[in-house]
Image: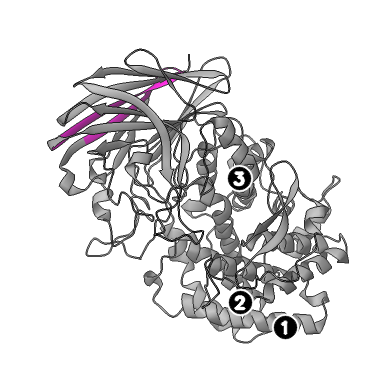
Amino acid sequence: MPLFFAAEDLARAAARGGTAPWPGYDEAFLLQPAPLTMRLPDGRLRHEVLRHDGVGLSRTATDDAKFAAWVVSGCCVAHALGRGGRFAAAARGWIAALVELPIWDVPRQGPPTRAEIDLNYGNAAYACAFFLDLCGGGCDPGFRDALVAKMIAQVELGDQRFARRPVDDHAFTQNHFYIPFTGHLAMCLALRPYWPGADERIARARDFIVPLFAGIGRDGWYYEGVNYCHYAVIWLVRLAELAEGHLGLEVADVPCLRHLHRFLRWSMFPAGRHFFNVGDNSSKNWSFATWAEADRSDILNWNDTWISNSAHILLWVGRRTGDPACRQVAEDALRRGLHPAEGFWWALWDDAPAGPAPAEASHHFADAGVWAADRADGAGNVLRLLARCGPPMGHGLELDAAGRPRHRFNAGHVHPDAGTVCAAWNHLPVVLGPGYLGRKAGTALNTILLDGLGQEDDRLYHAFLPDQIDYPRLRRLTLRPDAEGANLDFAAAYRPAQGVEQIARHIAFLGGRGFAVADTVRLRSPACIEARFRIAEAPRRCGERGWSWRVEGQEMRCELGDASCPVELWAAPGDVTTINDDGSPGPLEAGRTCQRGWQLIIRTQAKEIGACWTIRFLIP
């Protein structure tokens, strides 16, 4: 059986009408010349490639093998759809450059010293498996034999990582696990006709698949955020396709895939191409003082993680579940003008059911502890709120008899931000998340600080590692929707030494043009209590108790209502510390200081045993 799709899938895709075989099809992209090498003199991975920058094709230098993999997979499918042998020849050139590397993932600092079975391994493995499956039969035997030998050697390396330790000793829900794991499995399956040892490796890999999908969540919310969903969750669909088509496992209807359309639908702004920055969403060095700068950076620098890259995977889910809402959300994303990567999946999965889906005015992701809701103002404008108050990997993460997580999870790019709130008005931000952080400090988040400190594991890069947190305590975080908003209780998010008795936040719509945030804090000993909210433009003070700012000409306001004690208000640049992964000296969590918008800050004038206040955000 073919690796990812049967002959009838290819026949249906080839018969589609129109001038191009799939959305985003571009011959210049697919037929670009491959580099002779992807290796710099010091051994690091580096190659030039054409990519879509949001406007058209532009050439960029990158150490990310996914761009090469996209060229290979697109060329292989174009060849399989009868577009000509030149596409197979182009794919062969890129494969030759990939397999020339001594190892498939090299350290980003200094010369390679060991094989890294990580993201580039996964992308290179996927590309080689794709080529061997669709083009291997027609290429010259010498090249095919060399490719098979290279793949076997890499499978053996992967087998050492994936199958030589108990399953639960792996952080198998981390994209740094399941991306290379899926590439590894794809190689094993593609090698079946050429290598007797493939079946043994496939059998060992099979043990990961059921717990992997079970561990990612029970409500469709992808824990690492939209940005990581864009490039990572396609790998879960690829893995599900391989598991169902070759291993006899039924995984399309697992909750993390069945409800994925709700995650994408509610993570987008009501209009436009932007989405809520919950978790590490944004480019790593994203810096802006005004929304126009953020928008320009978005277009030019990180379109490979736009939401369109996730849209086609909903067609696959819709095909398997029969839910028309999957196609509805996918097509909505494409209509927003976003360029899809590997758009051929649209052609291959275009038989997903269409039709009206039930309209939702709100949704509660109960496992993740996330609530999102819309209110319209009667003039076609929509205000969308999103709030978080749940443990990093969901309430349903399985615990062992001692109360510890059963497997060694890694919550990766989740922030310690229980209680956070974000908002968007049509295509404009009202209250933002901070984006990609190295130091995941409470000072960067839209939540409550006590004496300048945020929540458990504040200031760590990977903020939720199993040996750093008390996961059972974090499972006590609660979010309960009501008729007008949501109630968040997040006292359990703070360290026991901080002496928190209650931290509660009620978020409520004020019609369709505003919302209120009411905070209640009770402590065992006095502390300076502070709330922060990030906005996109520099604010100006409006009297003693409010601010005003404009985003693309739309005025927005924030007003402090009742407060139980004297407070002070001010605004500051929204500084964040980025991740340090460019070879600079220093720890990973201490990179550059960047500005991302501005922060509105409400703080008690003195240390208090408790405080209550109400803050209103309005679109006049």
Magenta segment, which residues?
503-524
Is 595 on the left-hand or right-hand side of 479?
right
Give the labeled residue for mark 1.
146
Cα distance in 3D space between marks 2 and 3: 30 Å
Q: Quadrant of residue 157?
A: bottom right
Dot 2 or dot 1: first in sequence order is: 1
Amino acid under disc 3: Trp
User: Which residue does the numbered mark 2 point to in the structure image?
Assistant: 188
Classify 10 Å Cα crowding around label 1: few (below 14), some (14-19), many (20 and above).
few
Dot placed on the residue nearer the N-terminal end, 2 or 3: 2
Q: Residue at x 77, y 65 (%)?
A: 34
Looking at this rendering, what residue extends furthest in the bottom direction? 196
Residue drawn at 52 percent across, 54 percent down: 253
Is 395 positioned to the left or the right of 149 in the image? left
Q: Position of residue 359 (x, y in %)?
A: 54, 31
The colour scheme applied to this rendered structure is one colour
What residue is pinned by disc 3? Answer: 306
Residue type marked 1: Ala
